[in-house]
Amino acid sequence: MPVDRELPTQEAADLLALTREIADAELAPKAAQYEREERFPREVFRLLGDAGLLGLPFGEDVGGGGQPYEVYLQVVEELAARWASVALGVSVHTLSCFPIDRFGTDAQRRDLLPEMVGGRLLGAYCLSEAHAGSDPAAMRAAARATDDGWVASGEKAWVTHGGHADFYSTFLRTPDDGERAISCLHLTPDLAGFSAARPEEKMGLTGSTTAAIRLDDVPIPADRLVGERGRGLGIALAALDSGRLGVSAVAVGLAQSALDVAVAYARDREAFGKRIVDHQGVAFLLADMAAAVESARATYLVAARRRDAGKPYARQASIAKLVATDAAMKVTTDAVQVLGGAGYTREFPAERYMREAKVMQIFEGTNQIQRMVIGRHLAAEAVPPAG
């Protein structure tokens, strides 16, 4: 069912209408088949790029859409309601553009960013490693300094768009800058020694390729450094705050679709002489699902509006990611329950939604990590006196 949205401008309303039109025509009809075939929809990203949907939160001066995060995230949610893999790809692409947009030199912003945010190129974000997922400071992949730049060695894990992306925002240990120093570098797949491993075989989001990236003495030009040497971990964590909001929007879109499928089925299916939606047990279950979806949407919008206002939002981003992805897991599981035996078959998309929801509690920081982040903020923030 259409979501009743409160948007800040008529331009935003028109953008959401365009998004729904494209998503209904180009994403929804392909999603199930591409997911079954584990097929990466590169042509869909080109279409979204041509429509201006891959650079929405970036400035118009660099080819972006100049939209507030509040609007961008609702576009992501609408895409996710039709095809979660594609919506996740948009979020990851935005995440991969963030370092150059926020920390890049004037030359990098001028020469690289328009192609990146304009949608002609697709990005990837290389932070995690097999032994350093929740603890990125423990990464081992490294780049040693040379007269011309760096030479990188090691492997990055769980890279969305790995092997398909046109550029990779990559975080590597740079020991010349200090034992624990990490730097951010802009890599492209044409560099010698750069390769992607065989894609992971996953439970869900199979239309979104995930692969390790191998760096075998990759020469990196000096002008590929993003931000200050040795300060890359701060860039990575700042990017993740925004990325967590993207995942929150994807989770809400997925949960909304699961709710819609469950409501439609409950209105149509009859048992004991009446529609199952008219049985209190099912109606209460659907009510809880609807409450979870709308609460999660409100939570990510609160965080997005803080970001747009220039206020601190890291705690709110972690809360949104925690609430939205837990809600998606519960709502998709309950959707399968509402459909009963039919929900366990591939005739309906409910089982796919449930499989897709699980990983959202894991990537961009597991939900256990989100609780740690929230707890640390609560411990550090000043508490006003009572009374």
Image: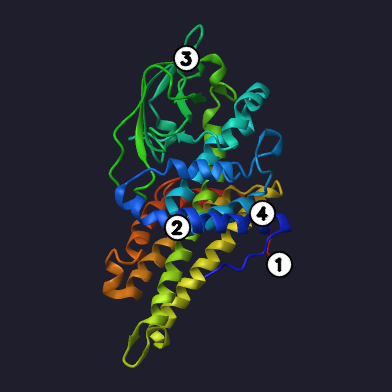
State the residue position of label 2: 28
User: For residue 231, what is the image quadrant?
Assistant: top right
The answer to whether mark 1 and mark 3 are in CB contact below 8 A is no
Position in image of residue 58 (x %, y %) = 65, 40
State the residue position of label 3: 150
Q: Is residue 293 above or below residue 96?
A: below
Q: Is residue 25 above or below residue 107?
A: below
Mark 1 closeness class: few <14, some 14–19, many ≥20 residues within 10 Å: few
Tell me which numbered mark, 1 or 3, is placed earlier along the sequence: 3
Write the residue at 42% across / 87% down.
Answer: 278
Write the residue at 30% across / 66% down.
Answer: 347
Distance CA(mark 4)–CA(mark 1): 29 Å
Judged from the image, the secondary structure of the residue bearing numbered disc 2 is: helix
Q: How is the image coloured?
A: rainbow
Tell me which numbered mark, 2 or 3, is placed earlier along the sequence: 2
The answer to whether mark 2 and mark 1 are in CB contact below 8 A is no
Residue, far top: 147
Q: Which mark is residue 387?
A: 1
Check disc 4 and give the amino acid type.
Arg
Check disc 1 and give the amino acid type.
Gly
